[in-house]
Amino acid sequence: MPYGTLYGIAACLSSNFGVPDGGNISQSIYTDNGGVLIDNGNIVVGGEQNGSYCWCRITYPVVSNWMWIAAPSWYQKTNSPCAWRCQADCGWHISNYSVKRGAAFNLLQN
């Protein structure tokens, strides 16, 4: 970004945590409890490949809560697994969609 580099992590989870599949960009935001997501009983730390729902969060220079990026239908349509594309999809959405980027900054943790 013009103001500096953002770093983050991505995870392919088994749940959309109630976010509507195929919803608009604003519906893909998940304001969780203190940045913690639990998938299959485990705390999500990034890099998980448990499922086909792509999630990500900014980790530097600020920390955001988790944000849902893509659904299984997207990966089926593109014929590529979540684990192969999720990280790139997170970076692309944050870089190219001002609404998604703004939403990520709205999810900053205190």
Image (cartoon, grey):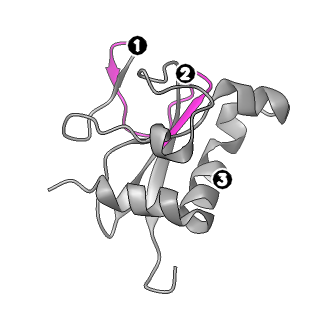
Q: Name the kind of residue labelled 2 in the image.
A: Asn
Estimate the x, y position of residue 17 in percent, counting from the top left.
Answer: 41, 22
Estimate the x, y position of residue 30 in percent, counting from the top left.
Answer: 37, 37
Q: Which residue is mark 3?
A: 88
Q: Nearer the viewer, residue 32 or 9?
A: 32
Q: Name the kind of residue labelled 3 in the image.
A: Ala
Range covered by the magenta-colored residues: 40-55
Q: How far apart are labels 1 and 3 at the CA level?
A: 24 Å
**At 44% from the left edge and 40% from the top edge, which residue is drawn?**
46
| SS majority, magenta | loop
* Direction top: furthest residue: 40
* Nearest to N terminus: mark 1 or mark 3: 1
Query: Do callouts 2 and 1 mark residues in contact (Cβ within 8 Å)?
Result: yes
Q: Name the kind of residue labelled 1 in the image.
A: Asn
**At 52% from the left edge and 18% from the top edge, which residue is drawn?**
14
Estimate the x, y position of residue 40 in percent, counting from the top left.
Answer: 40, 13
Q: How would you rate the neighbour count of disc 3 (Cα within 10 Å): few for under 14, some for 14-19, many for 20 or more?
A: few
Quarter of the figure with the C terminus: bottom left
Element type where label 3 sits in the image: helix
Q: Nearer the viewer, residue 56 or 47?
A: 56
* Direction left: furthest residue: 110
Q: How would you rate the neighbour count of disc 2 (Cα within 10 Å): few for under 14, some for 14-19, many for 20 or more?
A: some
**At 38% from the left edge and 42% from the top edge, which residue is drawn?**
66
Element type where label 1 sits in the image: loop
Q: Which residue is mark 2?
A: 50
Q: Which residue is mark 1?
A: 40
